[in-house]
Image: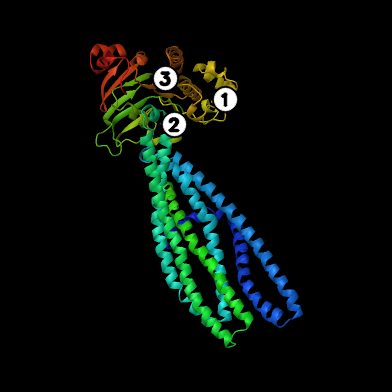
């Protein structure tokens, strides 16, 4: 049950309850006290029978019932204290584990988020952590308490008749083998359960996020079948654990019953020969019967432990992942915003074709440069490298002459505002979304940013104004309104570098014209990088960089590039929008 690997995992889990050692100490004392009361019960049966019922001792008639009552009171109070204290410690540990996991997720490299499905990451927190919590709140309590109970009862049995007790203990190695075999089977099945739960969570998330597409393409039955197959796989793995767990307990009890039957026969023979007093016989048999329940609990808790250890492996797999490299220590006193790519080569994991190949480009400070090209040309990759979401395999990127890898990561990102085509809003107030990540912003500054982004005109009409909650992913707002909130967020950050991934794509013509005017103000005195999909929105850019399959093929102003009659002119003549 507790092999070397399991003990290693459990020791690591116990580090989360170490800060609460005082409460743990109270729990252990209460457990020891509760366990000590168990052998007191059969011990009191001997004088109850021999002295009270047979010898009619007046003192015993009064004292023994009072002692039995006292034992039950102490046992009840001790069990209450151990239960409450252990649950308090366990939930403190769960809180710490969840907080550490959430912090870890926020500091993982972008590639990890790309490799892991969101459902599997969610499953680790929503499913795996409670499994670990059960191991922390139940398993160690049962192991310690019931082990002490068994030791106490076995001690009493040895004291009463060591010969009969040794006969009963012969079955011990066989029981240990069965439990060990069951542990291995349950651990493997529990791992499969965790994987299936991650897939099930992923199916749920896809179904909820893609409900419109499911309906419009009539894919309800297809998605229902996919969900059913995943749920059925989870059910089968769950039943594997149930079957092993269900067989484990009866087998142990059956073996224990065989041993008990043999001991009962021998004890009856000894009693018939007057080697036992009636009280000793009843006390011995009662103590033997009482051992069954802690053995059953210890055998049963094996399933909880194996589920918890499989979950712990999954959790520690996440916690042991390398975080984003933050090797830089430099903090720039002033940022002008000149960005230089020097012979940069980058390819995504699992791809043999580089997204950028020996790419070189200088983005002058306080100018607007637009990135143009077909899908897969490398535009978004440039933005991901500037923000250090990914690291190039070759070459360097400089900010004002300093390699960005030498700049402290959080300081680097403080210099960048980002407005994506796919706006991310949080289920919070409009004010919190505009001032996202900052608690030192006045309402006047938030209103000013909203006005600059032409968002105030619809915000002030809302019943709760800035305190209106936007809903999940800004569900209560239109696409254009969501994008204006994102632009207001960028206004408020007022960073020297601004990256815009076609931030006006979801706006109507009137809103787009207002935003274009706001953008003219926002572009002043900062470096602006526009990932362009609609060429009409970047005609006024200082420079336009045309990318093709990870290479810079053209660079110049709108008019200059049209006169070259190259790739840009061809894209422009094909139509206003390009696939990017």
Measured from the top left, where is residue 342 in percent x and y? 30, 30
Instruction: Give the residue at mark 1.
Output: 468
Which mark is nearer the camera, 3 or 2? 3
Is residue 53 in sight in this rendering? yes
Q: Nearer the viewer, residue 401 or 304?
A: 304
Dot 3 or dot 2, earlier in sequence: 2
Disc 1 to disc 2, C-alpha distance: 28 Å
Judge the density around disc 2: few (<14), some (14-19), many (≥20) Cα neighbours within 10 Å.
Answer: some
Disc 3 to disc 2, C-alpha distance: 26 Å
Left or right: 348 as drawn, with respect to 26? left
Query: Would you place residue 87 above or below residue 121 in this image?
Result: below
Marks counted in the figure total 3
What residue do we see at 43% from left, 50% from top?
316
Instruction: Give the residue at mark 3.
Output: 506
Q: Nearer the viewer, residue 486 or 47?
A: 47
Query: Would you place residue 94 above or below residue 508 in this image?
Result: below
Dot 1 or dot 3, earlier in sequence: 1
Q: Quadrant of residue 119?
A: top left
Instruction: Give the residue at mark 2.
Output: 413
Classify the position of the C terminus by image quarter.
Answer: top left
Measured from the top left, where is residue 511 in percent x and y? 45, 14
Disc 1 to disc 3, C-alpha distance: 22 Å
Element carrying mark 2 = helix
Query: Would you place residue 455 above or below residue 152 in this image?
Result: above
């Amino acid at each position: 049950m507790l092999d070397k690997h399991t003990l290693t995992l459990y020791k690591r889990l116990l580090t989360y309850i170490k800060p609460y050692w005082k409460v743990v100490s109270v729990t252990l004392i209460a457990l020891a006290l509760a366990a000590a009361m168990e052998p007191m019960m059969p011990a009191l049966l001997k004088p109850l029978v021999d002295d009270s019922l047979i010898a009619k001792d007046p003192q015993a008639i009064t004292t023994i019932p009072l002692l039995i009552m006292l034992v039950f009171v102490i046992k009840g109070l001790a069990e209450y204290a151990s239960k409450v204290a252990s649950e308090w410690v366990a939930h403190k540990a769960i809180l710490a584990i969840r907080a550490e996991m959430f912090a870890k997720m926020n500091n993982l490299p972008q590639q990890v988020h790309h490799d892991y499905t969101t459902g599997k990451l969610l499953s680790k927190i929503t499913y795996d952590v409670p499994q670990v919590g059960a191991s922390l709140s139940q398993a160690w309590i049962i192991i310690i308490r019931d082990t002490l109970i068994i030791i106490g009862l076995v001690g009493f049995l040895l004291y009463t008749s060591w010969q009969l007790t040794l006969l009963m203990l012969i079955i011990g190695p066989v029981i240990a083998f069965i439990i060990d075999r069951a542990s291995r089977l349950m651990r493997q099945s529990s791992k499969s359960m965790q994987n299936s739960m991650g897939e099930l969570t992923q199916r749920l998330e896809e179904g909820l996020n893609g409900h419109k597409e499911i309906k419009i393409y009539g894919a309800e039955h297809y998605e229902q079948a996919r969900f059913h197959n995943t749920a059925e796989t989870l059910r089968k793995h769950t039943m594997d654990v149930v079957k092993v767990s269900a067989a484990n307990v009866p087998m142990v009890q059956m073996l224990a019953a065989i041993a008990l039957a043999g001991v009962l026969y021998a004890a009856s023979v000894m009693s018939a020969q007057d080697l036992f007093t009636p009280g000793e016989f009843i006390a011995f048999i009662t103590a033997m019967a009482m051992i069954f329940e802690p053995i059953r609990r210890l055998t049963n808790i094996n399933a909880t432990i194996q589920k918890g250890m499989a979950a712990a492996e999954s959790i520690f797999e996440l916690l042991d992942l390398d975080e984003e490299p933050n090797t830089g220590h430099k903090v720039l006193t002033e940022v002008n915003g000149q960005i230089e790519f020097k012979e940069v080569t980058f390819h995504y994991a699992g791809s043999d074709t580089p997204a950028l190949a020996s790419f070189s480009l200088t983005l002058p400070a306080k100018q607007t440069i637009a990135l143009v090209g077909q899908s897969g040309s490398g535009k978004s990759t440039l933005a991901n490298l500037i923000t250090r979401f990914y690291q190039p395999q070759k070459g360097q990127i400089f900010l004002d002459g300093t390699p960005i890898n030498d700049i402290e990561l959080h300081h680097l990102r403080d210099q960048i505002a980002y407005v994506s085509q796919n706006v991310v809003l949080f289920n919070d107030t409009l004010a919190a979304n505009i001032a996202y990540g900052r608690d030192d912003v006045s309402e006047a500054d938030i209103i000013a940013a909203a006005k600059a982004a032409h968002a105030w005109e619809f915000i002030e009409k809302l019943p709760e104004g800035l305190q209106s909650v936007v809903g999940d992913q800004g569900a209560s707002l239109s696409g254009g309104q969501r994008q204006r909130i994102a632009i207001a967020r960028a206004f408020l950050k007022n960073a020297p570098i601004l990256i815009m991934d076609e931030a006006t794509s979801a706006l109507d013509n009137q809103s787009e014209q207002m935003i274009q005017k706001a953008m003219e103000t926002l572009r002043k005195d900062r470096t602006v990088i526009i990932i362009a999909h609609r060429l009409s929105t970047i005609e006024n850019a200082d420079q336009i960089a045309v990318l093709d399959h990870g290479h810079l093929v053209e660079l110049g102003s709108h008019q200059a590039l049209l006169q070259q009659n190259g790739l840009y002119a061809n894209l422009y003549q094909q139509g206003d929008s390009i696939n990017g």
